[in-house]
C-alpha cells in the first residue's frame, strides 16, 4: 500500500514558503509582489492539502516522532536501562531523572511539538477564508479537522510532560512580544477537547481511505481514540467510555491476526491501526536533506547498530512465562533471526556496550536482514485498537468492578497474543484492585515500547495507584522544566513561569 511519505515530499516546497510568512507583508510586496505569502497562497485544493501535509511532515522530523519524541517519552518511564557509556548524556540524564532546563533532549522535543502547533494554527486560521470554487467548503472542513487533530495531539503531549505551557491558537507573527503561558492548564485541556470534538465531526471513517493513497491520514476513529485517551488522562471515565464505545461500535477496527503485525513494515495501516506516522526507508538522506522520511528506532535501540539502551529488568521480568510476545519484543543470545531465521544472535553481534542478556527487537529490522540498516521505514503506531480495548477494560473496572465485560476486553487482547485468558494464578480478577493490577500488567506487556507506559504511570501515580517511575523521582519531576533556550528567547516568559524546583 502506498505510504504517506509522499506528504514529506509534497510539503517541502510549502514548508519553505511558510518561513516567509513571519516577514512583513508590506516588505514582501515592495520587494516582489509575487513572492509567497498567506494572501496569495492556499487558493486551490492542491495548495491547501500541501499545507496540511506539511503538518504531517512535522511528525516525520528528527525532533518529533522520527526520533526525539519517543526518546523523551521512553526515558521518563520504566522500560529502559542504559546499554553503556555510548548513550548520549542528555538521554542518560533523563533516564536517571537528573533533569535540568538545559537538557539537550528536552529542547528539541519541545521544538518539534511547537512546530506542529504552528503549522496547524496556520491552516486553521487561514483556510476558512479561502473557500472558493477552486477550494470547496467541504475540502476546507476536512483539512481544518485534520489540523485540529494534529494540534490537539501536540498540545496533549505538551501538557502531559510540561503542564501549563505557552499557548497560542493563531500563527505567531510578532516574535518581539513572545507567547505567554495559558491562563491555566485547564484552558489548554478544554481546547484539546474542543479540537478533537470538532475533528470527529468532519473527519471521515477509515473505510473511506482503505485501499487508497489517503490511508494514513487521520480519521474519525483517530479523533475518537485520542479523545478517549485524553479523557482517561483527565480522569473523566464517563466521557472516555462514551467516545471509545463509538470506536468499538463503528466496526472499522479489530485486532490484527498477529501481534507482530503492529510493529513491522509489511503490515502497516492494518485493521488494528487507528493512527500511525508514515515512514519510508528509501527516502533516507543521512542526517538531513530534503528527502528524509525515516525513523531511527532500529539504530538507537536494537543491538546491531548503536545499541544505546536495553529493556529494563523490571519489564523483562513482567512477561509471563511462555508469552509469545516476549520473543517478538526481545532478542536473547541463541535466538535466531534474519530473513530465513538463519542467523544465530551471539554476543559478538552487539555493536557496542554491555552484553546484556536481553536486547530490544521490537520495531527492528532483524527479521528482514542479517545486519539491519541504520534508517528505518517502519511506521510508528501511535493509536491502535488493542489500546482501545484495554482502556475500556480499565473504565469498566473503575465504574462497575471486575465484570465479565471488563474481563472480555482484556481477554480479546490476550487471546490474540496466545496467552491463557484471565483470571490466572498470577493475575486473579476477583476484586476491583486485582482486576486493575491485571489490566496494568496487560497494558505494560501489550503496549511496551509504544510510548503508552510513561503516560499510564503518570496518571496512575497521580491517583496513588502505582509507585514512581524511578527511584530518583522527586515531586518536582511531575513536569519537565521549560527548556532553557525557550526561557531565554520567549519575551513573554519570566523566571516565575519556570516549573517549580528548576
Image (spheres, grey):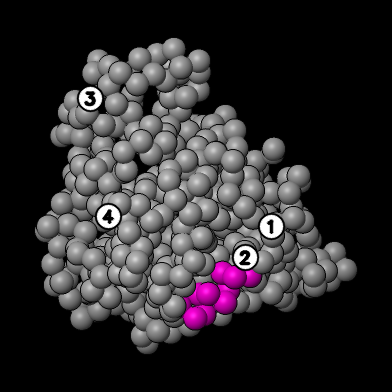
Asked if the residues shown at circle 1 and circle 2 are in contact, with their CB atoms under 8 angstroms apart, the answer is: yes
Tell me residue 286's x, y (percent).
44, 31
Asked whether residue 170 is in view, the answer is: no
- Mark closer to the chain start, 1 or 4: 4
Real-space Cα separation, disc 4 to disc 3, in angstroms: 24 Å
Real-space Cα separation, disc 1 to disc 4, in angstroms: 32 Å
* Secondary structure beneath label 2: helix
Of the two numbered discs 4 and 3 in the rendering, the one whose residue sits closer to the viewer: 4
Q: In this view, does 472 lie to the left or right of 102?
A: left
Asked if the residues shown at circle 4 and circle 2 are in contact, with their CB atoms under 8 angstroms apart, the answer is: no
- Mark closer to the chain start, 2 or 3: 2
Residue at 81% of width from left, 66% of height from top?
Answer: 135
Magenta segment range? 237-247
Most frequent secondary structure within the magenta stretch? helix
- The residue under label 3 is 352
Q: In which quarter of the image is residue 251?
A: bottom right
* Secondary structure beneath label 1: loop
Q: In this view, does 277 lie to the left or right of 138?
A: left
Tell me residue 283's x, y (percent).
56, 33
* Label number found at residue 247: 2
Residue at 65% of width from left, 41% of height from top?
Answer: 3
* Label number found at residue 77: 4
Real-space Cα separation, disc 1 to disc 3, in angstroms: 44 Å
- The residue under label 1 is 252
* Secondary structure beneath label 3: loop
Amino acid at each position: 500500500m502506498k505510504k504517506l511519505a509522499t506528504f514529506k515530499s509534497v510539503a517541502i516546497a510549502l514548508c519553505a514558503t511558510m518561513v516567509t510568512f513571519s516577514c512583513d507583508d508590506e516588505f514582501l510586496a515592495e520587494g516582489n509582489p509575487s513572492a509567497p505569502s498567506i494572501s496569495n497562497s492556499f487558493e486551490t485544493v492542491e495548495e491547501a492539502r500541501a499545507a496540511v501535509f506539511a503538518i504531517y511532515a512535522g511528525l516525520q522530523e528528527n525532533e518529533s516522532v522520527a526520533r526525539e519524541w519517543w526518546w523523551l517519552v521512553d526515558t521518563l518511564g520504566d522500560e529502559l536501562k542504559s546499554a553503556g557509556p555510548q548513550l548520549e548524556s542528555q538521554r542518560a540524564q533523563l533516564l536517571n531523572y537528573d533533569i535540568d532546563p538545559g537538557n539537550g533532549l528536552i529542547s528539541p522535543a519541545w521544538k518539534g511539538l511547537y512546530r506542529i502547533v504552528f503549522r496547524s494554527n496556520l491552516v486553521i486560521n487561514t483556510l476558512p477564508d479561502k473557500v472558493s470554487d477552486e477550494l470547496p467548503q467541504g475540502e476546507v472542513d476536512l483539512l481544518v479537522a485534520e489540523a485540529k487533530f494534529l494540534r490537539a495531539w501536540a498540545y496533549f503531549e505538551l501538557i502531559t510532560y510540561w503542564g501549563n505551557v505557552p499557548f497560542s491558537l493563531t500563527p505567531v507573527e510578532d516574535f518581539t512580544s513572545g507567547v505567554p503561558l495559558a491562563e491555566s492548564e485547564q484552558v489548554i485541556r478544554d481546547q484539546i477537547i474542543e479540537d478533537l470534538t470538532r475533528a470527529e465531526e468532519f473527519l471521515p471513517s477509515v473505510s473511506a481511505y482503505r485501499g487508497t493513497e489517503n490511508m494514513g491520514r487521520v480519521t474519525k476513529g483517530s479523533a475518537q481514540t485520542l479523545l478517549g485517551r485524553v479523557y482517561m488522562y483527565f480522569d473523566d471515565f464517563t466521557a472516555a467510555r462514551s467516545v471509545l464505545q463509538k470506536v468499538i461500535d463503528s466496526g472499522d477496527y479489530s485486532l490484527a491476526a498477529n501481534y507482530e503485525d503492529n510493529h513491522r513494515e509489511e503490515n502497516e495501516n492494518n485493521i488494528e491501526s487507528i493512527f500511525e506516522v508514515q515512514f519510508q526507508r528509501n527516502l533516507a538522506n543521512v542526517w538531513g536533506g530534503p528527502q528524509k522520511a525515516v525513523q531511527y528506532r532500529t539504530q538507537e535501540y536494537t543491538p546491531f547498530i548503536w545499541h544505546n539502551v536495553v529493556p529494563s529488568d523490571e519489564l523483562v521480568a513482567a512477561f509471563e512465562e511462555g508469552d509469545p510476545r516476549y520473543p517478538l519484543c526481545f532478542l536473547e543470545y541463541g535466538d535466531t533471526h534474519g530473513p530465513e531465521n538463519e542467523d544465530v544472535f551471539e554476543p559478538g553481534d552487539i555493536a557496542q556496550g554491555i552484553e546484556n542478556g536481553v536486547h530490544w527487537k521490537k520495531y527492528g529490522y532483524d527479521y528482514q536482514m542479517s545486519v539491519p540498516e541504520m534508517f528505518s521505514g517502519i511506521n510508528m503506531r501511535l493509536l491502535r485498537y488493542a489500546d482501545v480495548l484495554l482502556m475500556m477494560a480499565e473504565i469498566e473496572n473503575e465504574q462497575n468492578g471486575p465484570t465479565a465485560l471488563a474481563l472480555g476486553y482484556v481477554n480479546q487482547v490476550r487471546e490474540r497474543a496466545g496467552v491463557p485468558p484471565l483470571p490466572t494464578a498470577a493475575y486473579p480478577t476477583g476484586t476491583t484492585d486485582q482486576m486493575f493490577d491485571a489490566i496494568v500488567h496487560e497494558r505494560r506487556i501489550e503496549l511496551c515500547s509504544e510510548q503508552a507506559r510513561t503516560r499510564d504511570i503518570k496518571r496512575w501515580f497521580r491517583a496513588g495507584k502505582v509507585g514512581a517511575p524511578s527511584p530518583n523521582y522527586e515531586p518536582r519531576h511531575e513536569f519537565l522544566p521549560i527548556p532553557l533556550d525557550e526561557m531565554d528567547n520567549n519575551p513573554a516568559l519570566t523566571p516565575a513561569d519556570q516549573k517549580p524546583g528548576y
